[in-house]
Amino acid sequence: MKSSNRLFILFLLGAGLAGVATAAEHRHDIVIYGGTAGGVVSAVTAVQEGASVILLEPTAHIGGMVTGGLGATDIGVEQSIGGMSRRFYERVYVHYQQPQAWKHETREAFLKRGGSRVNQADRAWWLVEPSVASLVLKQLAAEAKVTILTGQRLKSVRKTGARIERITTMTGDVFSGRVFIDATYEGDLLAMAGVPHRVDRESRAEYGEELAGVVPEAWSTRKQWEVDIRPYGPDHKLLFGVQDVPRGADGAGDRKVQAYNYRICVTDAPDNRIPISRPERYEPSRYELLALYITRKGDAINLTGPKGGSLLKIDPLPNRKTDINDGGPFSTDYIGGNWDYPEGDFATRQRILQDHVDYTKGLLFFLGHDERVPSRIRQQMQRWGYPKDEFAATGHWTPQVYVREARRMVGDYVMTQHDIQKRRQKSDSVGMGSYNADSHHLQRIVNAEGFVRNEGNPNDRAMGHTPYEIPYRCLTPRRADSDNLFATFCVSASHMGFASLRMEPVFMILSESAGVAAATAVKTNIAVQDVPVAPLQQQLLARGQRLWLKELPPHKKKS
């Protein structure tokens, strides 16, 4: 690729980062809203298929969770991942074959301590530093000459009948298109376009899903309180982190949302480590419940580990970095702190995001410095610090919160638990998923006996990682709602169906399929619902997508 092309995309990214924008009208075949990894994949794909494309991101961050700290990729069954999604991780593999990629440890040392998600035979590398993921994603976009504008938050949508004509952003810029793709985690474009959606979890009765609705206490032992703790302070009020709301009957639906968190990248490399200092808005009272848990667990408590009693889930990334995820019953998941996020306005979301940052940074400081934490755990925690070579523009802290679920479109076909367990074949398959139905907890409440319990994670009853086909129909709205829109993350699914679909490799798979279909709709001037499935599938197969269970390479079912 010519250097001028690379400079072109970097200039656009830099212009958005600096907030330099002049109101203008832009016309393209396809307008993609959401600079997530899926959004980039859709854009690259559509350009490769001959369409003119513009990719808009409301923030300054490109790549979503893939470049935002989720470096320990949620694979499921590796053989189900194809197309550009797989090629992304193959490029990561190539990157880590270079000696210059290893600055803080050797490749051999990393593979020995944590390289279980590196497939040497298939040349796929599923453990990636945020900066490397960003580098690879930008390379893909630059090679396709994708136009990316950041700082373009949606303001309004103009629609005639079922057709979206243009969108306007807060900068005053207007973007007209023949097809639009919502590649956001929140579904803001589809919502503003009046496409029906849900943010609730369905009852068990609505679709006949065994795992739907409020999870029975006996079913939910993962990341659960193994000891009985009464969650009240000396003033007899509930401690921070416990919601004073009705639990709900087993199997009942509600409008609570599974917890968000930040996937935390820290390092123990001395020359790359910034110590975790006391946060500006640190509130020790937020961790009283955790202190009680640590005291009750005693010697059984651990900073991390595969069994009960761990506080954090620490996955190793190359160059002595981590992807820290939720670990125990009180961990990085900010249970109940996100309920107003999916449909909140900008100010509401900003408040929630700042609250999540304060909570998470405070948690790390608490574990490393509070005297109620055993000294052995404090010493382990103090090994870690923020990496100097990650997220420099945002104080070495990721700008991307893990939106595990927000809006879900109500489209032509609703994917449910049945589709990921039993009805696993689809005639209009445009990709595959395979991850377990992984819903994180939605609420932390007091049970009938007066003890704290988490609710919402039914993994102990789920089926493990099993491949299934994903229909084209779950990417498109109903024709009367919009005939020129795709949703690639906020797809048409129930809460339990979405609990499996929501993984980043699947998001990229569906985004590639939507990019091809969108280009087809533009070329033939048809509604997205009328894109012929069989030719579309042949195009996807030619691009390396994996569509059929019957043609899946041999694999072992994982639990």
Image: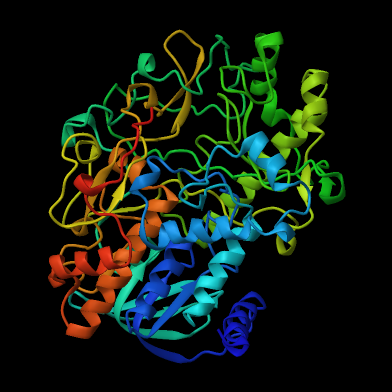
Q: Position of residue 200 (x, y in %)?
A: 32, 42
**Quarter that holds the N terminus:** bottom right
Q: Quadrant of residue 491?
A: bottom left
Looking at the image, residue 25 lies above or below residue 215: below
Q: Name the one closer to the observer, 94 or 68.
A: 94
Q: Residue at x 65, y 22 (%)?
A: 290
Number of marks present in the image shown? 0
- Display colour scheme: rainbow
Looking at the image, residue 108 lies above or below residue 210: below
**Quarter that holds the C terminus:** top left
Q: Residue at x 40, y 20 (%)?
A: 220
Is 164 placed left or right of 139 in the picture? left
Which residue is the extreme one toward the right?
271
Q: Residue at x 57, y 47 (%)?
A: 127
Is 425 placed left or right of 456 in the picture? left
Q: Position of residue 101 (x, y in %)?
A: 70, 58
Q: Residue at x 24, y 33 (%)?
A: 203
From where the camera sits, is residue 148 visible? Answer: no
Q: Position of residue 314 (x, y in %)?
A: 63, 34
From where the camera sits, is residue 524 visible? Answer: yes
Q: Name the one closer to the observer, 430 or 327.
A: 430
Is 171 placed left or right of 542 in the picture? right
